[in-house]
Amino acid sequence: MEELFGLSMTTLMYVLLGVVLASMAVLGVLAARNRIMLKMGLRPIPRRPGQTALIIMGVMLSTVIMAAAFGTGDTLSYSIRNGAVEWLKEIDELIVPTRAGEDARFGAAYITEERFEELLVHLSANDKIDGIMPQIGENVSVRNTRTGLSEGRMRLVGIDPAMLDGFQGPRLEDGGDARLDDLAPDEAYVSEPSVEELEVQAGDELEVFLEGRSERLRVAGIVSTGGFAGIEPTVLVPLDKVQELLDRPAQINTIVISNRGDSSTGVDLSEDVTKDLRVLFNDPEVAGELKALFGREDVLGALDAKVAGLEMEVGESGSSDELDNLRELTAELRKPELTDELSSLLADPEVTRAVVEQLEEADLDEVAAEAYTLLAELAEFQVIEIKKDIIDSSEEAGTGVTSIFILFSSFSIMVGILLIFLIFVMLASARKSEMGMARAVGAKRRHLVMMFAFEGTAYAIVSAAVGVVLGLGVSAFMVAVMNQIFAGLEESFTLTIHFEPRSVVVAYCLGMAITFATVVVSAYRVSRLNIVVAIRGLPESIIPKGEPPFRERLLGLLRAVVLPVYHLLTAFRALFRRRFREFTKKLGLAGLTALPPVWLAAIALGLLRFIQPYLLRGWLVLVAGIVLTYFGVAVWERWSWFGAGVSLMIVGLGLMLRWWLGRTEMRPEAVDRIAFTAAGVLMLVYWALPESAVRPIVGELEGDFDIMFVSGVAMVGAAVWAVMYNSDLLVRGLSALTSRFGRIRPALVTAVAYPMSSKFRTGLTLAMFALVIFTLVIMSVLTEVFTTQFEEPRKVYMGFDAGGSINFNTPVDDIQAAIDSAEGVPASDFEAVGGVTNVPVEMRQSGGESGRWRSRTSMLLDDGFLSAADVELKIIADGYGPTAEDVLAQMRDDPSLALAGGWMLPNNAADIARDPDAQRLLGDLHYDASSMEAVPLDVREPFTGVEVSMKVIGVVDRVHADAFRMIGSKSLIDGAAPFPVPVTEYRFRLSEGVDAKAAANALEAALLGNGMQTEVYRETVDEQNAAGQAFFRLFTGFMALGLLVGVAALGVVSTRAVVERRQHIGMLRAIGYKRRMIALSFLLESSFISVLGSIIGLALGLLLSFNAVTSIRAESGIEGLSFSVPWMQLGVILTLTYGFSLLTTFLPARQASRVYPAEALRYE
Amino acid sequence: MSDFIISAEGIEKTYDTGSVQVNALRGVDLNVERGEIVSIMGPSGCGKTTLLNCLSGLDDVDAGRVLIDGIVLNDLPDDERSEYRARRMGFVFQMYNLLPVLSAVENVEMPLLVSGVSASESRTRALEMLDMVGLADWAQHAPGELSGGQRQRVTIARALVNSPAIVWADEPTGDLDSENAAEIVALIQELNRTNGQTFIVVTHAIEVGERARRIVRMRDGSIEDDGHGSQTGPAEAGREAAE
């Protein structure tokens, strides 16, 4: 994995390593100079091993989560990359013809060996290439005559044994070379995966089905996978043999290239080789014309604007492939001659697509149209960087997975940070009197900060290490689960666990840095204690909080701005007074504060202190909220920023109300209650509103996962805020409710009263619990909603129960006749059969402004399909309705009529309004439209260049699996193509009561010669649902790691409570509390927090997911999407959470119950 | 038959501090009659609080036995001893030991709730008791909002709310100024007179100790003087009230 959120992992590693090492160095110096504080800080660690273990566990949880995410990403990257190398071996690029030859047939483009020989001269001259292989690769059906087993889709590969230089030739499974030139004319090798499919062994006879006939080949041996044998079941023969079998004399369809170097290093030359090859294959005349066209001033101006736009996006110094390519292109276009660099760029489809899009954007439609024509003529061959593409995508996959895991677990990480904070706040409160005494005898605040920093760092060093190890363990577990999921899918793929040392370092340093920063912040907070209050153990609330005067705050800020200079000046003053020790100290401080992070932190702190009174009065928060709201709507156009702005505004209003009420006679508690309850409730109301309620005011905004994060934090914060400031009402209510519980009532009373009296601590724990439950509820509901929606396969697959694809080289002439005559396939099993040809085509709107052809997959239906299909149409063009049946009937009569898949269109008018200038294939038609006019299109078959006209008369509902394609009539292309277009896929509607699996198997057997491969849609849907659910559950499980944090928090709180309340426990025992009542009181207390947190999380999670489902339904237009709650799963989650929270509190509760009253009362 | 509510016979208690063993009580014998107010006095570390803890069942004894109302307290299992404390004993401590998270009335009603008295009756009796100690208007205040004297009154109300036979008070005025201390002592005397309850008061304050007619003096874990020479007055009055 190379990147994380756009940052290079290597840079990230060095930065983090630098930060951590610098912090350690500073701490080391401080420790050496303040040994007493070091001793005081580290002393409690060995003294209380139980507590130390608990703290380390709590502190490490964020690291566990991050390390697990990195480990999973690394594993995915590595597995895909490794898979690519294992699969392709020395093969680096493929060269395939872009145009059909004279005797073209459906689906393939071939060149003659003569043409290859011409190219070979040039290719051999390239010293970056060490292997060139002419090849034919096609799909055929094969049957093992000995076992009777068959495979409908097997690769038939032919290579020239004389051209194996630079490649590792095929290897026999049991070692040794598989020599193709030694094969007898009727012999072939088969690859390892064939053994499983056909139970084949050397000496077996294979029947290979070809167009209208079959041939027999004897298996000479089994070859290992990879290289020319690929990873699929493959029959490997010499090139001339496959030419003979396929009736392609002296023709090939691929040239395979190996770069200099081995299977791993060859790919490093891929970019250079591809460039050379593109230059070689380009028609210089056409390239010259393109240079002239793109070199026009207006075109260059448009491209410069695009470059400027991209620079803005990625930052001035940043880079992206697209930006680099366009920068190079504009530079090369400005040179007088046609350079090789330019020629290569012109043949790069990514580059030309970006150029043409920009031309359309800049209203240079004519230039774009001309460019299309020239680009189609530019090169005879296309170069596919097959290995590099896969390796690049492996990086993307790894980075993507890590980013998703980290984003999804951001709540858990945040909760983990809260836990660290909570732990240190509690440690501080436990040592309050000790710290007060230290301050009384002369310790400064910074000494207390140091003391905690030393202790915290000791925990951080150990816990980050433990966290990384456990995180890697978690990722290993997740990889095992993913392998299980993959094993259930048809396309199986195995992940191999792999951790990059760099990721381990980043995870460790991140864990350390987060812990360290949290410790320093909490230490700073506790260092500001009042000495008397701390020594006497009085409540902090008795100290009235004054506001430092303006002058003092301003001076503080100014001093922070010039901090290094200030220290330098004081150092020289000390030198002047001959105070050399002070001079050294101040000089050191000047050096330390001159470090940018330290300096910036000091300025930020100074600024915060300066504005603190205005923040507390609310108006500054309100202003910040207004600014954020404005930017959220007008500049960033994102729901998350808008929502964060509104939330800040509400907080600001609450604080203003509090400040205003504070000036009246009202009691402070009542003021806080009114102000914070009002703000909390208002914020909850805002976030509970569906998007549609706010959209009319702010228009269309974008939102992804970030909105879930912001809304989660805001909603949970608001709810906890409101609850904590009304805790006494809750206590009273519970007190009244529990009046009938007899003897456990006193335990209940204390169980509720204690947490409610420590608002900060309880609020924090409650928020942790609620946040995690909130996320889990949303994930569970969304899993339920999205994996159970498409249950009716017949509906999804347009009225059919099973499908079967066939090899286009061996088509079925008449499917009905084939079924009627087939043995073991009762014709009565089939109610209807439809045929489909899936072809890639290019389309553009007839007479549209843009002449740009867009590649789209098209699904062309035969009459059988059109007669039997049950299609739901979202929109029907005027004059073609009113029902879907009417539309299909007209499509049968007029082959030029077609339907657009619902996913091909923008969702609604707002999506169009967001980018009104975009050139769209179907104009301004959107999925939400209630009516439409028929849209005429030009359609072109890319290989042959055959053009036909098509008219879109309806939009297919998104409920159908095929709703992302253009759906037309097969007769349209039958009449236009220069060769027969075979049906490549059939769909079957089965009679009632027919066993779909049995019918599908019978069809496969009967139509083996045609390469029939069937699928039962019920199984497909179930398999997809199962895989989807499994992945969602994996994510949910990963996020549930956050629950451990919440549970650990309860454990920490309870353990501390036992220590803090020792005397109270003694007193309660004195007045008659039995041991079990003490234990019960502690258990009830943790139950109270976990149950209340769960209720808040559950209620808010359900509310937000309801809104999310409603909004997604409105956006996507999927009517079948309905809100449903997986109560069972939620029940399990909540019960487990509760169970674990009880378990963690059990030990402290037992410890509390064993407190001996006489001893506890003596304890001070 | 004697009317001893408390009988201690040869109680011994040793603390092991790890490096040294401290003989806190060395074979203490003590009898207390019903309705007496007994002050236990002596220098710091003489074993006053340990004696109180052992007599009240808050602590175990190493040797000897403690009889309360004829029941051998140290033979009772922990649960029964707790139950006995809840029904028959009240405690007043120097540091008040009120639960800071509960209001005054909630603190006072706690022993009743523990004894299984219904919530409404507990509340009524707790309010009555607060009224008796002069804190009817402070019932809903948290301990943090009360003065030292007021907190000690709440503690006394809590100690008496379940009408215990014995009230144990460990330095009840130790944290109070002389004026408040005098008020608390007067209150104890008043309650003893009215309700006939037995009060065992550990104190090192002479002015408090002298208000009891019987003073037990301790030194080095033993009773130096069991105060029997001066057993008249309040004890007689208490006994009469109890009858």
Image (cartoon, coloured by chain):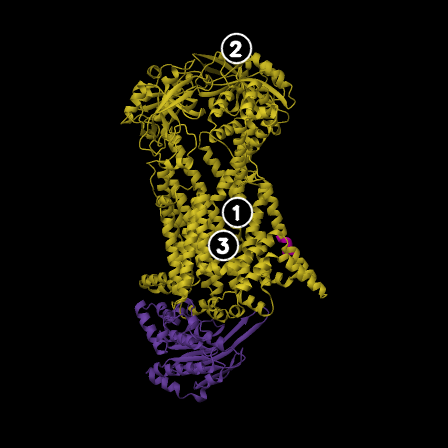
What is the chain identity of the residue bearing mark 1?
A
* First reached walking from the N terminus: tag 2 or tag 1: 1
The stretch of residues the image draws in magenta is A23-28
Are the residues flagged by discs 3 and 2 from a single subunit? yes
What is the chain identity of the residue bearing mark 3?
A
Shade of chain A as shown in the rendered figure: yellow
| Cβ–Cβ under 8 Å for marks 2 and 1 | no
Residue A76, given in percent of the width and then of the height, sits at 52, 36
Q: Which amino acid type corresponds to the residue marked 2 in the rendered image?
A: Pro
Numbered circles on residues, count: 3
Q: Which amino acid type corresponds to the residue marked 1 in the rendered image?
A: Val
Q: Does residue B15 appear in the picture of this structure?
A: yes
Disc nearest the viewer among 2 and 1? 2
Residue A513 versus residue A126 in the image, above or below:
below
Q: CA distance from mark 2 to mark 1?
A: 61 Å
Of A947 and A541, nearer the camera is A947
For mark 3, what is the residue?
A419
Residue B134 versus residue A997 in the image, above or below:
below
Mark 3 Cα shell of 10 Å, populated few (<14), some (14-19), many (≥20)? many
Q: CA distance from mark 3 to mark 2?
A: 73 Å
Residue A531, given in percent of the width and then of the height, sits at 54, 69
Q: Per the image, is B17 magenta?
A: no
* First reached walking from the N terminus: tag 3 or tag 1: 1
Are the residues flagged by discs 2 and 1 from a single subunit? yes
Residue furthest to the front in view is A297
Quarter that holds the N terminus of chain A? top right
For mark 2, what is the residue?
A249
Q: Dot 2 lies on which element?
A: loop
Residue A286 versus residue A5 in the image, above or below:
above
For mark 1, what is the residue?
A64
Q: Does residue A1084 appear in the picture of this structure?
A: no
Q: Which amino acid type corresponds to the residue marked 3 in the rendered image?
A: Leu
